[in-house]
Amino acid sequence: MELGEHFTQEAAPSGLVGGNEANLTDAISGEGYESTTMYPTFARQARAAGDTAAADLFTEIAKDEAAHQAAYKAALTALRSGKGAIPAPPAVTPVTVTAGQPKVTSAQTRANLDTAMHGEALAHAKYTLYAQRAQQSGNAALARLFTAVSNVELQEHFSGEAALAGSVGTTSHNLATAIAGETYESKTMYPTFAQQAKTAGDTAAATLFQHNATDEADHAQAFQTARKSLG
């Protein structure tokens, strides 16, 4: 629901999804920043802090993002010129995330992992919608490219970072984290956004934010029930 409904509905009025060329241009920019600036910086900081595993992961992801950028550039050239082919989608090697403690020691590395995970989650969500737009326009090859890269961002990059960050704990801990997040969104974040949108005259956005607040409250309650059932 968070991706298929909330993110998708919020993306529509924000103009997040454009035509295939605009979507590719956005993806090229994002992958370029991550491959040349964000991840190399995170890697240097992690290595300096002694978090070698994180440094190695950041370095590897930077290389992946550079490859994604190159594929998107080739796709954009093919789209604009009508010549050449959309590159084949990259293979996905899922990372299994098991419950455990953080595997890094530096506060900077932990903060960078959090930033990176937010970026990977957003990229996954955006590319999922970009793939849908490509499919709707009749460009199945581009849809496959966006979908594959989206899966890499979630199943490899996000998961690898989550494993190092110790993002997954016991079921009880995970439920408590989910409850806290859903409660904040239902009682604070979305009501605030709704009021601000209403004040600005953005009635449709205000209605959407309020609707999402109600959904998140339901999610929090469901998680509460599940936690109580653990005993």
Image (cartoon, grey):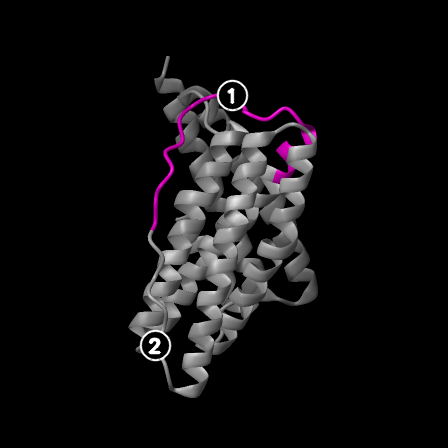
Residue 137: quadrant of the picture:
bottom left
Which mark is drawn over residue 101? 1
Position of 195 with respect to 91 (left or right) is right
Position of the C terminus, as image quadrant, is top left
How packed mark 2 is, by other alpha carbons closer than 10 Å (few <14, some 14-19, many 20 or more), is: some
Q: Nearer the viewer, residue 77 or 11?
A: 77
Q: Position of residue 86 (x, y in %)?
A: 36, 73
Q: Position of residue 200 (x, y in %)?
A: 69, 65
> Residue at position x 45%, y 84% from top?
80
Up/down of 1 relative to 15, above or below: above
Q: Position of residue 181 (x, y in %)?
A: 54, 35
Q: Position of residue 107 (x, y in %)?
A: 68, 29
Q: Nearer the viewer, residue 136 or 26?
A: 26
Q: Nearer the viewer, residue 194 or 58?
A: 58
How packed mark 1 is, by other alpha carbons closer than 10 Å (few <14, some 14-19, many 20 or more), is: few
> Residue at position x 45%, y 55% from top?
125
> Residue at position x 59%, y 37% from top?
55
Position of 66 with respect to 197 (left or right) is left
Up/down of 164 relative to 19, above or below: above
Question: Label 2 is placed on what type of residue?
Answer: Ala
Question: Label 1 is placed on what type of residue?
Answer: Gln
> Residue at position x 61%, y 29% from top?
51
Q: Which residues are magenta?
A: 92-112
Residue 89: quadrant of the picture:
bottom left
The majority secondary structure of the magenta stretch comes to loop
Residue 116: tell me if it is visible.
Answer: yes
Task: Label 1: state its secondary structure.
Answer: loop
State how far apart marks 1 and 2 are (Cα).
45 Å
Position of 64 with respect to 35 (left or right) is left
Q: Nearer the viewer, residue 141 or 2?
A: 141
Which mark is drawn over residue 85? 2
